[in-house]
Amino acid sequence: MNKAIKVLAGLLVAQLLVILALQTNKPGTTQVVAQPLISVNLNTVDTLRIDDSDGGQVTLRKEGDRWQITNYGDQPADQSKVAELLQKLSDIEVRWPVASSAAAAERFEVAEGSAQKTLTFQTGDRVIDSLFMGTSPSYRRIHVRANGSDDIYQVELAQHDIPANPESWMDKTVLEFEGDILSVNAGDLAVSRDTNGDETSWKLAGSATDSTDPTLINTWVRRFNSLVVSALVPAQEVEPIIVQNPALTVHLSSDKGDADYAFYTANEKYYVKRFGSSALYEIASYQAKPIVEIEAKKFMLNTSDAEPPQ
């Protein structure tokens, strides 16, 4: 009896598989295949423009193999952030739209002219596609609609992945000093080290070697290798800041060359520029203060004043 039941069960499964195959291949039956959200080849895109409903706007243009922010003093963009966005967009595939009507486009805020955000792709001056982004139904998911289509999809993407303000795209490490630093002259303070020495070979000019802590000197010096700025100062605001004497001027020498910096204070904020460039940047106080407020006594050993740069 058990054997007969097993045989009948096997025949039933076989019949169901045959029926399913016939239905799948029946004329008029549609199989939905995943397709890319973006129809254009993003490798050919050299300009990205992002507009939001609040009037924010940023234009990223590729010059050679580097992205720049054209409406932000042609500042270098964060290359990894642009690459990450393009990769995310390339990877998104869609199947079923959540809606396909003009009314739904207004409701989900993906209609042209009223979308929360519009991302435009260009090659040269030619617009090749646009993507309209709207409401967020859940965490890291938004409604999107491609230009020329009524279909609205829900995709894994966040509005903060595509900010419409230039500061969010700027390479904040633009002033990092490259190379193995060999000497620093900052105001009246000068430190140097042997070209063949290690991080313990720092010397403070005017002080005995055994009275200073080379580790403290090295900690301060390395701050120039990791400078992070906050924002570009608008051109019309530069002169009132730099017309005053800088809080500190710095000359750096390394195995890759020399550079000069000037730090300024105005309106309880800190600013920095590199000589040879007209660009002036705002820099956070926690970055600037340990550099600007340095004193020789902070490098000394065996004194109550000795303390590491904050």
Image (tube, rainbow, N blue to C red):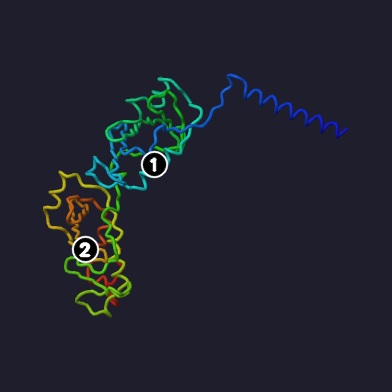
In the rendering, at what x and y percent does residue 179 appear? 29, 63
Quarter of the image that includes the N terminus: top right
For marks 2 and 1, the one nearer the N-term is 1
The residue lying furthest to the left in this view is: 243
Residue 150 against residue 1 in the figure, above or below: above
Disc 2 secondary structure class = strand
| Residue denoted by label 1 | 85
Q: Nearer the viewer, residue 160 or 38?
A: 38
With 42 as the anchor, is 255 left or right in this view? left
Q: Nearer the viewer, residue 59 or 241?
A: 59
With 96 as the anchor, is 212 left or right in this view? left
Quarter of the image that includes the C terminus: bottom left
In the rendering, at what x and y percent does residue 203 appear? 25, 75
User: What's under tag 2, amino acid-wise?
Assistant: Asp
Residue beneath the point at 11% across and 52% down: 243
User: Where residue 50 is drawn, which disc sits there?
Assistant: none
With 157 as the anchor, is 16 left or right in this view? right
Q: Residues within 10 Å of mark 2 (few under 14, many from 20)?
A: some
Residue beneath the point at 31% across and 59% down: 226
What is the total number of numbered labels drawn onto the structure image? 2
Residue 102 against residue 87 in the figure, above or below: above
Disc 1 secondary structure class = helix
| Residue denoted by label 2 | 258
In the rendering, at what x and y percent does residue 5 appear? 83, 31
Residue beneath the point at 62% across and 24% down: 25
Q: Nearer the viewer, residue 251 or 6?
A: 6
Residue 149 against residue 66 in the figure, above or below: above
In the rendering, at what x and y percent does residue 97 appear? 48, 26
Residue beneath the point at 33% across and 33% down: 120
User: What's under tag 1, amino acid-wise?
Assistant: Leu
